[in-house]
Image (cartoon, helix red, strand yellow):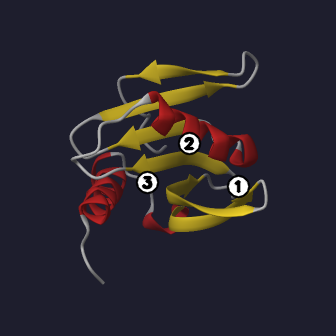
């Protein structure tokens, strides 16, 4: 497997989730497929809670890619199907953490995500 810049970001972010935030490796899935509008898409990182529900979606970009509103729109479209509580967008240099507010149909930016408990 070739270590692309995006894959480098993905692998480092998985290690952050495991080593720093203490998420169990068994709750983390890479490149999970989903279908949106009859088109097959893949989440970069999907973290489940202990009930098997979607907890966190992480969208990884290469460090050379600037994170824009379009990046958030992409992860928000995925979340219409997945209903995860947290959305994260990272290019390895910048990280944006959001908590979903399903009642107001928006997201709130956070400094980081909670540790696994």
- Is label 2 or label 1 in front? 2
State the residue lying farthest toward the top.
Answer: 104
Name the residue tied to disc 2: 75
Q: Which of marks 1 and 3 precedes in the sequence?
A: 3
Q: Quadrant of residue 99?
A: top right
Tell me the crowding category of disc 3: few under 14, some 14 to 19, or many 20 or more residues within 10 angstroms, Cα based.
many
Residue 97 place in picture, x, y as percent: 42, 31
Separation of residues labelled 3 and 1 (CA atoms) = 14 Å
Exactly how many numbered labels are in the figure?
3
Residue named by callout 3: 23
| For residue 37, above or below residue 115 | below
> Tag 2's secondary structure?
helix
Residue 23 lies in quadrant: bottom left
Sort mark 2 into few (<14), some (14-19) or many (20+) by Cα contacts within 10 Å. some
Q: Secondary structure at mark 3?
A: loop
Residue at the image position 34 percent from the left and 42 percent from the top: 90
Q: Position of residue 3 (x, y in %)?
A: 24, 73
Query: Outermost residue, bottom direction?
Result: 1
Residue at numbered disc 1: 51
Mark 3 and mark 1 residues within 8 Å of each other at the beta carbon: no
Depth check, front residue: 68 or 96:
68
Q: CA distance from mark 2 to mark 1?
A: 22 Å
Q: Position of residue 57 (x, y in %)?
A: 53, 47
């Amino acid at each position: 497997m070739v270590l692309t810049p995006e894959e480098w970001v993905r692998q480092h972010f998985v290690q952050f989730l495991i080593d720093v935030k203490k998420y169990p490796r068994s709750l983390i899935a890479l490149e999970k497929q989903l279908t949106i509008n009859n088109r097959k898409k893949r989440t970069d990182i999907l973290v489940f809670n202990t009930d098997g529900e979607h907890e966190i979606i992480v969208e990884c970009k290469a460090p050379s890619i600037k994170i824009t509103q379009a990046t958030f729109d992409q992860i928000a479209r995925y979340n219409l199907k997945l209903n995860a509580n947290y959305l994260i967008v990272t290019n390895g240099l910048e990280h944006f953490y959001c908590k979903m507010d399903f009642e107001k149909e928006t997201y709130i930016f956070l400094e980081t995500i909670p540790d696994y408990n």
